[in-house]
Image (cartoon, grey):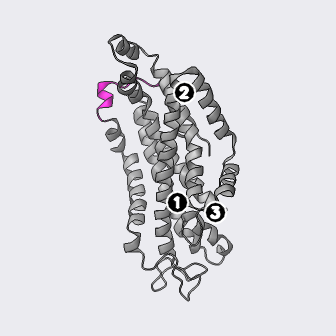
Amino acid sequence: MTQTTDLLTGAPPPAARKPRTAARSRHPYRTALSTARARTGLVLVGVVVLAGLLAPLLAGHGPTDQSGQSLAGPGTPGHLLGTDDLGRDLLSRVLYGIRTDLGIITLAVPAGAVLGCLLALVAAAHPVADTVVQRVFDLLLAFPGLILALAVTAILGPGRTPVVLVIALAEVPVFGRLLRGGVLVQREREYVTAARVGGGSGSRVLVRHILPNAADPLVVQIAVSLTVAVFIEGAMSFLGVGVRPPQPTLGAVLSQSMPYLAQSPHFAAGPLITVTALVLGLSLIAEALNREIRR
């Protein structure tokens, strides 16, 4: 659950990146997202997101509706992907599971990113604050992911809120350290000194000069963290400490399929394919963005 942009995306440390020039800053992300790699990722992510958003229209049944056909195979009339062990439509379970997962990760990752970045800015402002914030980051990184998930669940109980909290807490030190390092490097560069000599206030120099150059890796990290969040949510649901049943998540559907893999392998196919497409798409987008900011 702990990761850095450098390890996961191969991005160089902040000191190795060139300051953003006018030519680079015009449309860097548009250029990155116009590559074949990024377009493939956008298509994969777009299909999954669209399927989740249109779940009420695409699903022929409610995610908890039961029929008299348990473990029916794909192509069964009225059940395109078949049914689970309780006779619930698997297509509906997967589609509504996408909605649940997307709601969790799109809330948790931005929350962790915002909190981590705020702490990083506080740390960069004063040496004493930096020491305190660094110890907070160390404390969060010291907890293994599973222990953190179990601890939060033991306090709050299973549900959506604990999953969001676990993911957010896991991302706070990742984004915090990434931005802190970038700010510390950028503020020593000559263009920042020139801006200060030119009469720019501390806040103006930070917002107009330092942050634009220090923030590029954060964009890549968001895509990486969304990928990690998918795994965290899936792992918590798989272990039974995630969203409460019978509300579907991709991890929960996959967990329920384990005892029946030998006789009904289709049970696991839907969530596996969906998670693979989502993770692959996000990874391709992250790699395309990373290649652009390294130029």
Please give the label number shown on residue 275. 1
Q: Can residue 15 be seen in this snapshot?
A: no
Q: Tell which circle, 1 or 3, labels the residue nearer the N-terminal end.
A: 3
Image quadrant where one finds the C terminus: top left
- Left or right: 257, with 196 as reference point: right
Describe the element under mark 2 as helix, strand or loop: helix
Q: Label 1 crowding class (10 Å Cα cut-off): few <14, some 14-19, many 20+?
A: some
- The answer to whether residue 54 is left or right of residue 221 is left
Amino acid beneath label 2: Ala
Between label 1 and label 3, give the one nearer the viewer.
3
In the orientation shown, which residue stands out farthest toward the bottom? Answer: 68
Q: Position of residue 165 (x, y in %)?
A: 57, 51
Q: Which residue is mark 3?
A: 238
Mark 1 to mark 3 CA distance (whole Å): 13 Å
Discs 2/3, front: 2
Q: Which mark is residue 243?
A: none
Tell me the chief SS of the magenta region: loop
The one of 111 and 174 positioned closer to us in this rendering:
111
How crowded pointer 3 is (Cα within 10 Å; few <14, some 14-19, many 20+) is rated as many
Q: Let me know if residue 214 appears in the view.
A: yes
**Disc 2 and disc 3: Cα gap in Å?**
37 Å
Q: Is residue 225 left or right of residue 41?
A: right
The answer to which of marks 2 and 3 sits earlier in the sequence is: 2
Image position of 46 with respect to 256: above or below: above
Which quadrant of the structure image shows residue 58? Answer: bottom left
Range drawn in magenta? 17-27
* Residue identifier under label 2: 123
Q: Nearer the viewer, mark 2 or mark 1?
A: 2
For mark 3, give the secondary structure.
helix
Q: Is residue 190 magenta?
A: no
Residue occupying the point 36% across, 40% down:
32
- Secondary structure under badge 1? helix
